[in-house]
Amino acid sequence: MNRMLFLFFLLGVVLGVVPVSLAAEAAEPTFEPTSASEFADKIQPFFATYCVDCHGDSTAEADFRLDDIDGVVTAGKDIQRWEKALEMISIGDMPPDDADQPAVVARRRIAGWIEAELQKIGRGPDAARLVRPEFGNRVPHEDLFSGEHRGPASSPSRLWRKTPQIHAEFERALKLTDGTSPFSPKGGRGFQDYATLLANESTISAMRINASNYAADLLDGKLVYATGDDGKQDRSRKVREGRGRYREFNELLDADADAAPSDELLTAAVTRTFDLLLTRPPVDAETARYAEFLRQGVELAGRRQALEALITAVILSPEFVYRMELGLGESLPDGRRMLSPQEIAYAIAFALTDSPPDEALQRAAAEGRLSSKADVAREVRRLLAADTRPYWSYEINHTFQSHLEACPNPRVLRFFREFFGYGGVFEVFKDESRNGDHKPQFLFKDADLFVLSVLEQDRRVLEQLLTSDRYVVHYVNDVQAERKLKSIRENIEKNKKNANSDGRPDPIAEKIAKGLTPVLGGYRGGRYYTAYNLEQQSWDYPIEQPFSLPNRYGMLTHPAWLVAHSGNFDTDPVRRGKWIRERLLADTIPEIPIGVDAALEDDPHKTMRERLAKTTTSACWRCHKKMNPLGLPFEAYDDFGAFRTDHYFDADGEIVATEFERQQLIQRGKQRKQPEATFTSKPVDTSGYLSGTGDSALDGQVQDARDLVRRLAQSDRARQSFVRHAFRYWMGRNETLDDSPTLMAADAAYVDSDGSFREMLVSLLTSDSFLMRK
């Protein structure tokens, strides 16, 4: 225990918070040392059978030995080696696949023994770290879907911090304009909305500032530009004009200043504050407490300051900051409690939207029609059925805010954004000089539209998302484009010719004259559709419907996904393979060991596959064999997402990364009147290897990306891994073995409904894991 923690601990003893007996125990920690005989009888034989052949005196692969490890773990001599052995055994990376494997029971027994001994001295897995979403695959997949674990399932009683989107929707609904989001995303890999996120000091600080701004918005008139001495607008400063928006606040502010405010005025102001900020009326005890708080504030600081204090107090209350999921409903004999009807109403609303419960949900809760799983299923289906707008009317929204015009249930779309990770298209720097056509915001919208088009059909959703060649490509249909089209059509009709004023052929006019729909790439969108290998003059844009694209097979060959999982200047087979391994095969990749140089050689004369040869050494291949063979089939696409069949090399033998760059070199040579640029080429090697599906008919060599995604789409493990990720997203936590019935029921609902994502979601949101607390 470090000195600062000890001082706080001692202070707790003095104040009576921590019992003296506990303090004494903490000051002199005791534990049972590791039994050397137990190590010799149980652990050493396991190492001798399964580990020492590769990690012994003469064969210390990766410079790691287990033949001479100190068996007294608690002595602390070989802590790092024990922690490394525990990680490799726990995630199944040791022994390697081509070696004899221990029984599952034996593996768990050894891992459990090591973990227990490490915990005695405060080492081993960090429990706080393992609850993060990127560590969700630590529970063995086979166990979760074996049917052996029967629950009962539940989630911990918790306060689940609200999201930036919920806060943005709150501000939008009340027309609050001067606030900032106090809830920052988790950042890093994995889902961004987990119940383990807490409100920290920066959150509270931002909320206090917001409270002051919101009070001005709610209590004063609208914000307008000030008028200067010359009678004109002074756009350097703003003032408030007129009265506040709400009668209850105005009546309290306007009442006789010399008289104490009446109970009616105080109660009305408290009720209005609760309605605005918490979207519910206060209960009697809250009304009395906050009314008294408001009364004292009036006496001490005046009416305006008292109302500001009231608004601040409610904004800083746990209910404003958190989603309350404590389990205040019916208690069961096994110690679990169901969420109360009011808690269920909010849980359903925030599971699908960023808004509090709508009127129908609130009414169902108040009338006792939200107390059973059938009730929950009815309301979930009602909200999902509200998504009736056609997918193509979705407006571009690449700021991840809450209000999506064509998406009444934005959290559904956000799940696919975060599962596939294509929002990373904004985070990867792409030099415009390498490809001026690159427009991440349109690629992001296209990926959204692709998802929405599949969800609209709601059949074999995962299979379609992985294999469909029917894409939606954004059409730059702004006012300028419409005027341009109209002008060209009028010119064709008037002059009966398809030419510019100087007599040169106008390819756009020629296209329109043939009855085709052109893309006016010079307006707003640029020629970003070259990422799909589409060409402006020959592409007939199909309005409001998906269309087939050659050499494209679902989201994993979508330019948005390819760019999001690439480097700034290169493709990234390792990152792409890691995504497939973790998201679709429910596997775990260890973190890069400390001291290992993971950077690839920067050799412009080699292809990416050739540069990855470094990772095939014994020290690296143990992890890279799980990633490289899955990512290399996507080398058929450059780092901007365009399809290619060949690698090109310039006259100096340096690789030309994209077709755009090759054309640039050719054009530059023509402009400088130099000899035509010459290139050599070699075919792109798209071969790979699929392992870990649990199905021998699917595992094995793959020819290309199409072959790979087709097999993944047929894999039960990939489908179940998809269900596991949906569970994490909607439960806000990692799954446990007690959740096995929930996961199996959701998977069965998906299969039995011919791959309906809605039915899978109904199953999750009516499960014990969602509705029960313990």
Image (cartoon, rainbow, N blue to C red):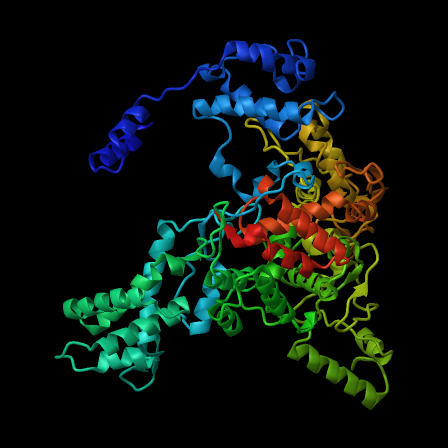
Say above or below: 59 vs 132: above
Rendering coords of residue 723 (x, y %): 66, 49
Residue nearest the observer in this picture, 317 or 1: 317
Rendering coords of residue 6 (x, y %): 28, 30
- Residue for point 65% across, 70% down: 385
Task: State the image quarter where residue 648 is shown.
Answer: top right
Say above or below: 290 vs 112: below
Say above or below: 575 vs 24: below
- Side (left or right) of 421 relative to 299: right
Task: State the image quarter where residue 260 is shown.
Answer: bottom left
- Whether residue 193 is visible here, answered yes or no, is no
- Residue for point 56% across, 46% down: 153
- Whether residue 644 is visible here, answered yes or no, is yes
Rendering coords of residue 200 (x, y %): 38, 49
- Side (left or right) of 710 relative to 569: right
Residue furthest to the front: 333
Rendering coords of residue 534 (x, y %): 79, 62
- Side (left or right) of 653 relative to 733: right
Q: Quadrant of the N terminus?
A: top left
